């Protein structure tokens, strides 16, 4: 009599449960749902159909969850990093190197933007009419950087009341730059107080660990949020909006692609690092930035992959990544304003001089700090146009494709915000190369409680 066969347990493949493939599946599912929603008819009352509404609600709710984590994460991380920097001899050098590389990459990006704008001539190749021109609702100012440093309150919160159909609604927002100032001041004060502040620093470290655990739970929902966000984008924007601004839109994405696929890899290779490991490590933040169109909303995830994937020390990453989320914007503050400024000048038939091009470079390299804490690239564009003396009404010409180009801009922004801390950490000899080169095994990062198997 033959022996009974052993019972085989069917296991789910690793690729099906890993975070990375789940993100890709979310992107694919989102595109499919977006196309279905776009093909559906609108509701009887003329509003969006139920699928579009569902995707929009889920997507915006996920971004809100991430945004909620920003204030406690940035505050506790900055305070903790300042306390830990007591043991880092080159803390001032790290800060200077960070700002220096912010400027270098912005300089390269704006040069690329100017070249593409001159070659493509998007303002001369558009059928947009003058009736599309209108003044923007908000304008950038060089004073915004200085006034933005002064906190409005302890939590850097601001309130805005809008009246629609006689009903008033109040929404809260926060200024990340002011939050950085507050957290830095408290962290430095705690160091000056000395032994009496030790209980506070211990409590802050415990709170940071709790916030990071909650953040991990939120991040695990990223595949769902990704599907909803990209689905809503496909359903809402489509490609119909490009219309007469096709050359401009393509020019922006060419510029972003050159920075993303050429400039960043060259910088990475020049520092002896693996390009593949960098992009596989930063991918979760890049894709979330693309679908969410929010560097601040993506900030918690960007900081996490920078630490746990790319090997940047936490005490440095918790300073550099939030700072980058406000002042490091190669997409919004370099590529976009350069090409957009040339578009406006070409549209109105205004010839730019060498001085004007130099001003575009200066504004792009240091101007993003002047718009820190504000929303969108429109403010940065108005700062550029006003500096050059170009018509601000030209901003209205580009609003039709704003959501479409903003997706690519934000993805490049977020990637650059992780790149600079990685490069600086490598240059200063504090990058954890074992973690950077560790095999991903289908997961871009692991839970805090899990053991990290590093390549030996």
Image (cartoon, grey):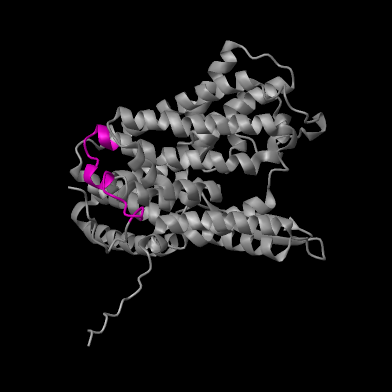
> With respect to residue 253, does 111 lie above or below?
above
Asked if the stretch drawn in magenta spans residue 437, the answer is yes
Which quarter of the picture shows residue 163? Answer: bottom right
Rendered view: 90 above or below 4:
above
Asked whether 202 or 390 is in front, the reply is 390
Q: In this view, does 367 lie to the left or right of 139?
A: left
Can you see residue 198?
yes
- Asked whether residue 137 is in view, the answer is no
What residue is at 68 percent from the left and 52 percent from the top? 236
| 105 drawn magenta | no
Nearer the observer, 255 or 154: 255
Residue 346 image offset from top left, x and y in percent? 70, 20
Give the residue at x 25% y 37%.
Answer: 91
Range drawn in magenta? 425-445
Q: Where is residue 68 in the image (x, y as percent from the top left)?
A: 48, 59
Q: In which quarter of the image is residue 58?
A: bottom right
């Amino acid at each position: 009599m033959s022996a009974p066969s052993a019972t085989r347990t069917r296991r789910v493949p690793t690729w099906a449960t890993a975070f990375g493939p789940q993100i890709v599946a979310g992107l694919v599912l989102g595109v499919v749902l977006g196309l279905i929603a776009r093909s559906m008819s609108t509701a009887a009352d003329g509003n969006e159909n139920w699928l579009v509404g569902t995707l929009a609600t889920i997507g915006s709710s996920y971004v809100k969850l991430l945004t909620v984590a920003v204030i406690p994460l940035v505050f506790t991380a900055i305070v903790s990093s300042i306390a830990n920097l007591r043991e880092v001899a080159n803390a001032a050098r790290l800060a200077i190197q960070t700002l220096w590389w912010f400027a270098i990459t912005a300089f390269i990006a704006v040069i690329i933007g100017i070249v593409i704008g001159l070659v493509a001539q998007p303002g001369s190749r558009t059928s947009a009419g003058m009736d599309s021109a209108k003044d923007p609702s908000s304008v950038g100012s060089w004073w915004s950087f200085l006034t933005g440093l002064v906190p409005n309150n302890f939590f850097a919160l601001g309130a805005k009341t809008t009246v629609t159909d006689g009903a008033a609604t109040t929404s809260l927002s926060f200024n990340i730059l002011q939050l950085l100032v507050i957290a830095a001041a408290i962290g430095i004060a705690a160091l000056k107080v000395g032994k009496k502040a030790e209980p506070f620093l211990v409590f802050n470290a415990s709170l940071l660990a709790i916030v990071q655990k909650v953040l991990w739970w939120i991040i695990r929902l990223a595949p769902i949020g990704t599907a909803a966000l990209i689905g809503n984008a496909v359903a809402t924007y489509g490609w119909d909006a490009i219309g007469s601004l096709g050359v401009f839109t393509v020019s922006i994405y060419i510029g972003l692609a050159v920075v993303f696929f050429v400039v960043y890899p060259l910088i990475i290779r020049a520092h002896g690092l693996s390009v593949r490991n960098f992009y596989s490590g930063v991918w979760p933040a890049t894709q979330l930035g693309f679908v969410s169109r929010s560097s601040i909303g993506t900030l918690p995830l960007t900081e996490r992959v920078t630490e746990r994937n790319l090997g940047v020390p936490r005490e440095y990453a918790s300073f550099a990544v939030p700072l980058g989320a406000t002042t490091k914007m190669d997409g919004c503050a370099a590529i976009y304003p350069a090409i957009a400024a040339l578009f406006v000048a070409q549209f109105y038939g205004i010839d730019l001089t060498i001085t004007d091009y130099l001003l575009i470079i200066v504004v792009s390299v240091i101007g993003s700090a002047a718009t820190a804490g504000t929303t969108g690239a429109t403010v940065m564009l108005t700062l550029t146009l006003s500096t050059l003396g170009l018509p601000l009404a030209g901003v209205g010409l580009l609003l039709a494709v704003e959501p479409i180009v903003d997706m690519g801009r934000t993805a490049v922004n977020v990637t650059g915000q992780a790149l600079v801390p990685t490069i600086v950490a490598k240059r200063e000899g504090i990058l954890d190369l074992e973690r950077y080169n560790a095999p991903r095994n289908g997961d871009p990062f692991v839970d805090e409680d899990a053991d990290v198997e590093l390549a030996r």
